[in-house]
Image (tube, rainbow, N blue to C red):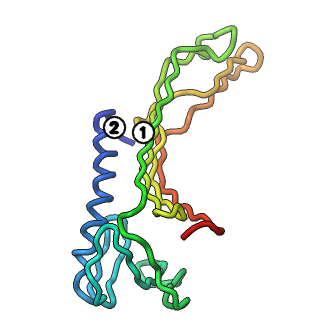
């Protein structure tokens, strides 16, 4: 995996945040033709099967729509996993009225030894691990979607080391996780939400 400079990673994170806003803004204008489909960079396919007669959705307005979610298998439409049409209940949400969040944290460790004896294989050089998260949640707090990356600069470091080579010929070392990333979606059930 190619290493990413700290400046490059920060720029990539900023571009990631900006691209989410641009995709949201471009989806409404791109799908203005009935029956046309659009596929996002992530592979999500959006089809506007019926153009509504209401006013254009603007930030702060309430959107009401039906949807059907399909899983595609080998490029062909497969299993339906959800549909507001089947329930007879449209999906309703306020557009652009939610909460955006950006979070970052940095963990720094100076040079240290894992044991009191501090054999050469038990010494660990200082390291810095940075994590980042960007999210968007509904105004009522009922749901949230967030993208995150841990060990942003792919720092290589050990979380444990032990030299038992004198007794068993083994030197044990456990490394910290490499860069890893994902998307988290949460939904809160229960009363107290509008």
- The x and y percentages for residue 143 are 52, 63
- Side of 101 where 24 appears, left or right: left
- The x and y percentages for residue 176 are 56, 34
Residue visible at 71% across and 20% down in the picture: 169
| Disc on res. 152 | 1
Which mark sits nearer the N-terminus, 1 or 2? 2
Quarter of the image with the N terminus in it: top left
Label 1, secondary structure: give it: loop
C-alpha gap between disc 1 and disc 2: 8 Å
- Side of 29 where 166 appears, left or right: right
Residue visible at 33% across and 83% down in the picture: 47
Residue most toward the top? 117
Label 2 crowd (10 A; few <14 / some 14-19 / many >=20): few
- The x and y percentages for residue 118 are 64, 10
Residue at numbered disc 2: 4
- Side of 14 where 152 appears, left or right: right
Residue 128 vertical position relative to residue 19 in the rendered view, above or below: above
């Amino acid at each position: 995996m190619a290493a990413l400079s700290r400046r490059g990673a920060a720029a990539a994170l900023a571009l990631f945040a900006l691209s989410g806003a641009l995709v949201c803004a471009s989806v409404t204008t791109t799908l203005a033709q009935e029956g046309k489909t659009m596929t996002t960079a992530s592979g999500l396919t959006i089809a506007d099967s019926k153009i509504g007669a209401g006013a254009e959705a603007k930030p702060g307005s309430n959107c009401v729509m039906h949807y059907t979610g399909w899983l595609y298998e080998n490029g062909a439409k497969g299993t339906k996993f959800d549909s507001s049409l089947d329930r007879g209940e449209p999906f309703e949400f306020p557009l652009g009225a939610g909460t955006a969040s950006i979070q970052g944290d940095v963990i720094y460790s100076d040079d240290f030894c894992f044991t009191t004896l501090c054999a050469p294989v038990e010494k660990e050089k200082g390291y810095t691990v940075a994590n980042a998260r960007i999210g968007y949640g509904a105004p009522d707090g009922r749901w949230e979607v967030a993208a995150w990356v841990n060990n942003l600069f792919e720092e290589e470091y050990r979380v444990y080391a032990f030299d038992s080579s004198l007794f068993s010929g083994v030197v044990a070392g456990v490394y910290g996780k490499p860069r890893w990333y994902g998307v988290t979606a949460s939904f809160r059930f229960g009363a107290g939400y509008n």
